[in-house]
Image: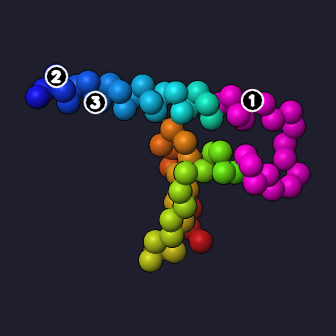
Amino acid sequence: MKRERQCEFSSGITHMIEELTRLKKLLEELEEPLDRFDEKLFTEIVQAISISRRDEMTVTLIGGLRFTEML
């Protein structure tokens, strides 16, 4: 059981690293700062957006990166 948990953990870490590498590649492909909203890029990068009752918005990106901002 311990070995199985370690394998699942390692697999999760590997997946996270792959997703972060993908995010980095997507951002490096941008030749210059965006001057307008890019829906395709947004849907590729953003996994979820949630808003709490405390007026906080959390954006989750591929690779599990999370950013929380006050609204």
Query: Residue at point 54% right, 33% down?
Result: 19
Q: Which mark is residue 8?
A: 3
Q: Quadrant of the N terminus?
A: top left
Q: Which mark is residue 28?
A: 1
Q: Is residue 8 visible?
A: yes
Between marks 1 and 2 in the image, the one whose residue lies nearer the viewer: 2
Kindly check if marks 1 and 3 are in contact, taking CB atoms under 8 A apart as contact: no
The residue lying toward the viewer, choosing from 52 and 69, is 52
Q: CA distance from mark 1 to mark 3?
A: 30 Å
Structural crowding at the residue carrying mark 1, measured as other residues with C-alpha within 10 Å and reported as few (<14), some (14–19) or many (≥20) = few
Q: Which mark is residue 3?
A: 2
Q: Quadrant of the C terminus?
A: bottom right
Q: Is residue 1 magenta?
A: no
Kindly check if marks 2 and 3 are in contact, taking CB atoms under 8 A apart as contact: no
Give residue 62's position: percent from left, percent from top.
55, 42
Note whether 31 is above or below 40 in the view shown. above
Disc 2 marks a residue whose amino acid type is Arg
The residue lying toward the viewer, choosing from 68 and 1, is 1
Of callouts 2 and 3, which one flags the residue occurring earlier in the amino acid sequence?
2
Disc 3 marks a residue whose amino acid type is Glu
Q: Give the residues in magenta.
A: 24-41
Give residue 43's position: percent from left, percent from top.
66, 51
Kindly check if marks 1 and 2 are in contact, taking CB atoms under 8 A apart as contact: no
Q: Which mark is residue 11?
A: none
Note whether 37 is above or below 52 in the view shown. above
Give residue 8's position: percent from left, percent from top.
28, 30
Determine whether the residue tagged by mark 3 lies in a helix, strand or loop.
Answer: helix
- Considering every residue shown, the one lying at the far bottom of the view is 53
Q: CA distance from mark 2 to mark 3?
A: 9 Å
Using residue 67 as the reference point, say whether residue 4 is left or right of it.
Answer: left
